[in-house]
Amino acid sequence: MGTNKTWRTGLFLSLLSTAALGQESPHLKVAIVIYDSAHVGAKTLDRTERSAGTILQTAGIESRWDTGPVQDLGNLGTDFTAYSRGDCEHRPASAILRVQILPRAPSGFAAQALGYSLPCAKRGIQVAIFADRAADVSERGGPTFGRVLGYAIAHELGHVLLHSGAHDTAGLMKGIWSKRDWQRAAVSIIPFSPTDVQRIAALHQRVADRDIPELASLHPH
């Protein structure tokens, strides 16, 4: 990330003090199902879920995590439909969010991409994370593998919860990471920005309808 090619990814987590974390009661409960196609194992999944769950709590989100059978993926599919922004942002929030951890990034994604999300998907997998890319960040001086996965999942789930592929200039949803921020992220919690917390709490607020495809991915800017 940073300015060199090795460390540059599409997810720059700007560090905020843990003192800034919101302590409000959860206003949104979500069930998250993870499909471990990469076979990272139960211990890593536990660390990943705890890390991502703590980050989600900074937006007042209470998460329940389950592991889904990988064999069910064939029946779930993936919804790549280019819904209008109005249709995307006005629809009810999904009761169940589905995350797949892939062993490696498919062809066609930026070389440093950690994953992608489908904020408007009405069915199937909404978030995919690339285990090989997360491992590379960890091995090059970043947080532990499970913690990198947790940050990547929380960021992509943020896109789904916000019904948007847009990035912020600060906080969890910032678009570009640096090596220094990954190192600092290893010992701190990176929360959602206050603005995103408010937006998540107002998921059904009406906004102007603009037709655009929604595909958020972690890639260099």
Image: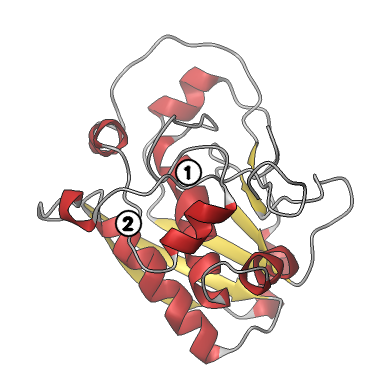
Name the image quarter holding residue 114.
bottom right
User: At 63% across and 65% down in the image, what residue appears?
Assistant: 100
Q: Name above or below for residue 175 compared with residue 179.
A: above
- Give the residue drawn at x 40%, y 43%: 161
Q: Position of residue 51 (x, y in %)?
A: 39, 70
Q: Do callouts 1 and 2 mark residues in contact (Cβ within 8 Å)? A: no
Local secondary structure at mark 2: helix
Please name the amino acid that badge 2 sits on: Leu
Q: Nearer the viewer, residue 177 or 42?
A: 177
Side of 195 relative to 77 (left or right): left
Question: Looking at the image, which residue is at 37% across and 41% down?
Answer: 171
Mark 1 vs mark 2, CA separation in Å: 12 Å
Q: Secondary structure at mark 1?
A: helix
Q: Position of residue 104 (x, y in %)?
A: 79, 67
- Give the quarter of the image for residue 52: bottom left
Q: Which label sits on residue 192? A: none
Q: Amino acid at mark 1?
A: Val
Q: Is residue 114 visible from the viewing direction of this image?
A: yes
142, above or below 9, in the image:
below
Q: Which residue is mark 1?
A: 160
Asked if residue 111 lies left or right of residue 128, the reply is right
Side of 160 where 141 appears, left or right: right
Name the residue nearer the viewer: 10 or 118: 10
Q: Is residue 183 above or below residue 171?
A: below
Query: Dot 2: few (<14), some (14–19), or many (≥20) neighbours within 10 Å?
Result: many
Q: Is residue 126 visible?
A: no
Q: Which residue is mark 2?
A: 56
Q: Nearer the viewer, mark 1 or mark 2?
A: 2
Q: Earlier in the sequence, mark 1 or mark 2?
A: 2
- Nearest the viewer among 61 and 18 is 18
Quarter of the image with the C terminus is top right
Residue at 72% x, 63% y: name it: 133
